[in-house]
Amino acid sequence: MKKNLKLPYRDQLIELGKLYKIEELKIYAKSKKDLTISQIELILLKNKVRLPAQSYNKKKISEIELKEQVITNILITLFLITFVVSLMSVRPYIKTVTSEIKFTHVAKEYKSSFKNKKIAKKPNNLNKKSTDEEYVSIPTQETLDIFENLKYDLKTIRLGQAVKPVYLSRLPKDLNKIKSTQKKKDTFIKIVMPLILDENNKILEDRKKLFKILNKPSNTRGEKVWLKRRFNDYKIKNEDIAELKIRMDIVPTSVAIAQAAKESGWGTSRFALDGNAMFGQWTWGKDGIEPSQKEKNTSHKILKFPMLRSSVNAYIKNLNTHRGYSEFRKKRSELRQNNKNLSGLDLVEYLYNYAATGKEYVVILKKIIRQNQLTDFDSSVLMNSNRSRSLSL
């Protein structure tokens, strides 16, 4: 004869209290206070527990417990999936922030050590005027160590990682000691690219401000003064706004690197090492380096600069203002108007006036860009760091 497994109604209520972990019932249980069925029902109802509509046996209670456990497991699983998906979506951001923190930490150490070196080398004569010698040329091996410690790598940049804001004042004097041609080229690119991107960023900031001013119904006195200065900077007469829009724009990174490589022999020429002249710009003034070989009846020199950044700035300004590059600027403006990327290979075609060899010069630049895959860097950006978090040496 089967035993009756049906639980008394009160026991069913107690089991439900245990199942839903009702703390109030636990407290009463510890105090050994007997509660009436009505009191237990009231406590369960306060905790939003549905009272049994029929008598439950132990098997039924187990089924309810299993169902609750399944629901709990499903909710936990959904939470974990959501957490993992969220983590994956923010991973690039976390990686970027981590990279910036690491860069900032290492950069501070280099800044401190480099500052101490400069102080040690500084002459005792405090009345002596500042000279170009204040900017120190770091040896090649030390430069390579800095790049390695900062995780500054061209392969990751080609894959989309931001460029580390490392600004060297001079090229290493012994750059030619690097035996590997590819390593020498990569080192040169790492040196000049942050400088090019930084100068382009300044132009983009000015360009953004320009359009903001032009879109306003009226301008403040400060904005009018700013506009006037930009007209002077870009050598524009009659305050021609349309011409300012055309001139105030960037030079593609691939074009700038290719021309720097061509004009400086990948950073090994006398002009680049002695005068920071990476783009071979001419001058007829005193502040220049006399070429060892030049045609008769020519009196030009190669313009020298106090540091590499000045050379990059002058080069970009030259392309944006000289009448010989008006076609370059016109084509660049057309690409902008058609919402197309400023590709180096598209624009280098119009730089035939930069050298006496004309079209041959353009062919050489195209070859440099293609062989070294420099267009990969046309979309590169600087790490989102302010001046205090950059490394200037």
Image (cartoon, rainbow, N blue to C red):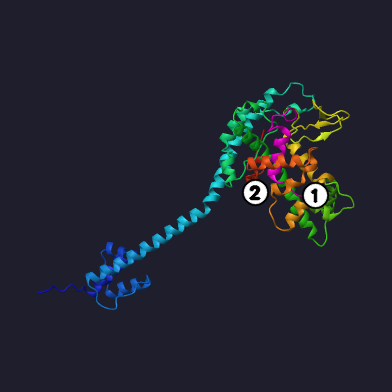
Asked if residue 206 shows in the view, the reply is yes
Location of mark 2 (residue)? 379
Secondary element at tag 2: loop
The Cα–Cα distance between marks 1 and 2, rounded to whole angstroms, is 23 Å
Extreme residue toward the front, this view: 360
Q: Quadrant of the N terminus?
A: bottom left
Q: In the displayed structure, does residue 52 sit left or right of residue 366?
A: left
Instruction: Find out whether residue 288 is within the magenta segment.
Output: no
Mark 1 closeness class: few <14, some 14–19, many ≥20 residues within 10 Å: some
Look at mark 1 in the image and give the residue it sits on.
Answer: 327
- Looking at the rendered image, the quarter that the C terminus falls into is top right
Label count reads 2
Secondary structure of the residue carrying tag 1 is helix
Which label number is shown at residue 74? none
Residue 106: quadrant of the picture? top right
Report the amino acid beneath label 2: Ser
Give the extent of the magenta segment.
Answer: 248-272
- Whether tag 1 and tag 2 are in contact, CB under 8 A, the answer is no
Q: Position of residue 48 (x, y in %)?
A: 37, 72
| Residue at x-position 78% and y-position 54% | 210
The overriding secondary structure of the stretch rendered in magenta is: helix
Q: Verify whether residue 265 appears in magenta.
A: yes
Check disc 2: other Cα within 10 Å, few if <14, some if 14-19, many if 20+.
some
Q: Is residue 109 visible?
A: no
Vertical arrangement, residue 273 with respect to residue 85, above or below: above
Residue at 65% across / 28% down in the picture? 175
Q: Determine the image quadrant of residue 40.
A: bottom left
Residue 356, image x and y in percent? 80, 37
- Judge from the rendering whether residue 65 lies leftward or rightward of residue 110; answer left or right: left
Q: Which tag is nearer the camera, tag 1 or tag 2? A: 1
Residue type at the position of mark 1: Glu
Which badge, 1 or 2, is on the more N-terminal residue?
1
